[in-house]
Image (cartoon, coloured by chain):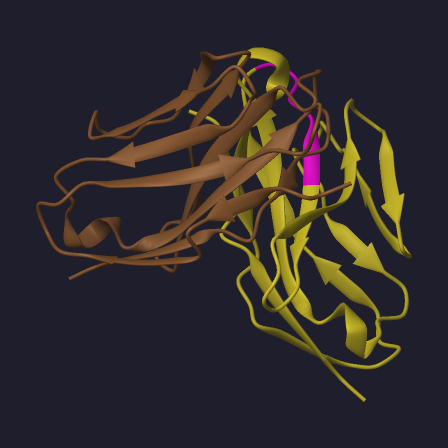
Chain colours: A brown, B yellow
Amino acid sequence: KAGVTQTPRYLIKTRGQQVTLSCSPISGHRSVSWYQQTPGQGLQFLFEYFSETQRNKGNFPGRFSGRQFSNSRSEMNVSTLELGDSALYLCASQSGGRNEKLFFGSGTQLSVL
Amino acid sequence: GNSVTQMEGPVTLSEEAFLTINCTYTATGYPSLFWYVQYPGEGLQLLLKATKADDKGSNKGFEATYRKETTSFHLEKGSVQVSDSAVYFCALSEGQAGTALIFGKGTTLSVSS
């Protein structure tokens, strides 16, 4: 079974630009979550989608948004990039049941210059 | 809000030493508790979990017990190996279906032979 796939692996953008990251979950998984990992703040929950609906949302500004498609693939968008958005963005999938194990991808490393 | 605090590293041990990584949490309600591990260059993997008070999670020689009275979930292993060198994250679940995780900052473990 293929794991969680995130693309691209690395990304370099400049301030003010926008970026879209992609995540393909494990086949059959209906829940996709996004996390931001930085050395200072650690791992922080962004949002979770289940069956194309946002089910949970973390404490991030509206510049961070996401969506999920009918095949469970998910995209995350960050508009008007700031230097502080430089981070490793991790996607995780699970079947959607309560307290089920999360399967993480290897992440997209975003650098904002 | 909910939060997780874990001991800061790095933790440096010799092979076969005893490991304890402390984790305490603050939460309303009764969250599930998790330990995730991140090996160098890889994504996070679930190590173990406990879903209610007094539950003990175990895997690969690692153990942790959900202590509601002390709001703790300390990770222990009786005899560490070089291959256990990694970053360990304590986490609790919140949100609908418990699919949003709040992570601690992570503890880096380095084991030498």
User: Residue at the location (57% across, 72% down)?
Assistant: B10
Counting from the top left corner in percent of width and height, residue A27 is at 70, 29
What is the number of callouts on the image?
0
Quarter where residue A11 is shown: bottom left
Quarter of the picture holding the C terminus of chain A: bottom left
- Along the viewing direction, whichever of A12 and B97 lies nearer the viewer: A12
- Tell me, yes or no, whether the highlighted magenta stretch contains residue B15: no
User: Residue at the location (72% across, 32% down)?
Assistant: A101
User: Residue at the location (51% across, 30% down)?
Assistant: A33
- Tell me, yes or no, whether the highlighted magenta stretch contains residue B32: yes
Counting from the top left corner in percent of width and height, residue B69 is at 71, 28
Quarter of the picture holding the N terminus of chain A: top right
Q: Residue furthest bottom?
A: B113
User: Residue at the location (38% across, 26% down)?
Assistant: A58
The prevailing secondary structure element of the residues shown in magenta is loop
**B84, above or below B6, in the image:** below
Q: Residue furthest left?
A: A16
Q: Could you tell whether A71 is left or right of B33 in the image?
A: left
- Along the viewing direction, whichever of A75 and B81 lies nearer the viewer: A75
**A113, above or below B2, in the image:** below
- Along the viewing direction, whichever of A2 and B28 lies nearer the viewer: A2
Counting from the top left corner in percent of width and height, residue B66 is at 77, 33
Counting from the top left corner in percent of width and height, residue B25 is at 58, 35
Which region shows up in magenta?
B29-34
Q: Could you tell whether B25 is left or right of A75 in the image?
A: right
